[in-house]
Amino acid sequence: MKVMIFGATGMVGQGVLRECLLDPDNEVVQTVGRSPTGVKNAKVREIVHANLFDCSAIEADLRGFDACFFCLGVTSAGKSEAEYTRLTYELTLSAAQALAPLNPQMTFVYVSGKGTDTSEQGRLMWARVKGKTENAILRLPFKAAYMFRPGVIQPMHGERPKVAAYRVLYNLTKPLLRLLRALFPNQILTTEDMGRAMLHLAKRGAPKRILESADILALSIT
């Protein structure tokens, strides 16, 4: 199997990359992002591309993949709706629209978020934009597309958020996250859960297209 990861330098992407490299079914794991991952592995092919709004220059390297795990995302904090829309909806759709015609048998997994609003009419700006993004992806001609809506995610193997404030928060709450996961296993996911669930979808699919935390956890252990 050949898989592609957008955003492999973020916390979720780091965890997904780790699980992809551990899976013996994966022959090639291609990362696409604006900065290198620093990971050295025989399976890894790395594309560093500054302008992810336009993938035409790397189109030849985007063909022939079985799955794409889209883990690229930004916080909405401090951003206008126009700015957040550009960095979330427009960027994601630019990549997805480039991939769909090149890979008609591709499974596309998009990391969205708990509380996403697919009506696109709600009060929360980020939820409307994420909902618009989900809706647009689901209309594209992929073999299958799945929306992941995790809530809290616990890093397991040294994965680190790119945003400094989030790194501090995760360091402070690490003991609490372990306790909460033990008490509420369907609500607190790990980076392992995310990667393993994505690989399950790439190999076997699932009947639901929108997956909440409990759905993701169930896929990760089957």
Image (spheres, rainbow, N blue to C red):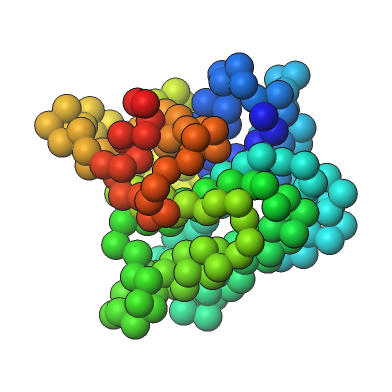
- Residue 175: give x, y in percent of width and height: 22, 28
Say which quadrant the C terminus sits in: top left
Is 183 placed above or below 213 here?
above
> Could you tell me if residue 172 is visible in this image?
no
Question: In this rendering, would 209 be left or right of 42?
Answer: left
Say which quadrant the N terminus sits in: top right
Residue found at x 65% / y 25%? 26
Q: Nearer the viewer, residue 164 or 118?
A: 118
Snapshot quadrant of residue 97 = bottom right
- Residue 76: give x, y in percent of width and height: 43, 66
Question: In this rendering, would 23 be left or right of 27?
Answer: left
Snapshot quadrant of residue 136 = bottom right
Residue found at x 61% / y 71%? 90
Residue found at x 46% / y 79%? 81
- Residue 62: give x, y in percent of width and height: 78, 47
Is 55 placed above or below 176 here?
below
Q: Nearer the viewer, residue 13 or 204?
A: 204
Q: Nearer the viewer, residue 209 or 9?
A: 209
Residue found at x 62% / y 56%? 142
- Residue 208: give x, y in percent of width and height: 38, 51
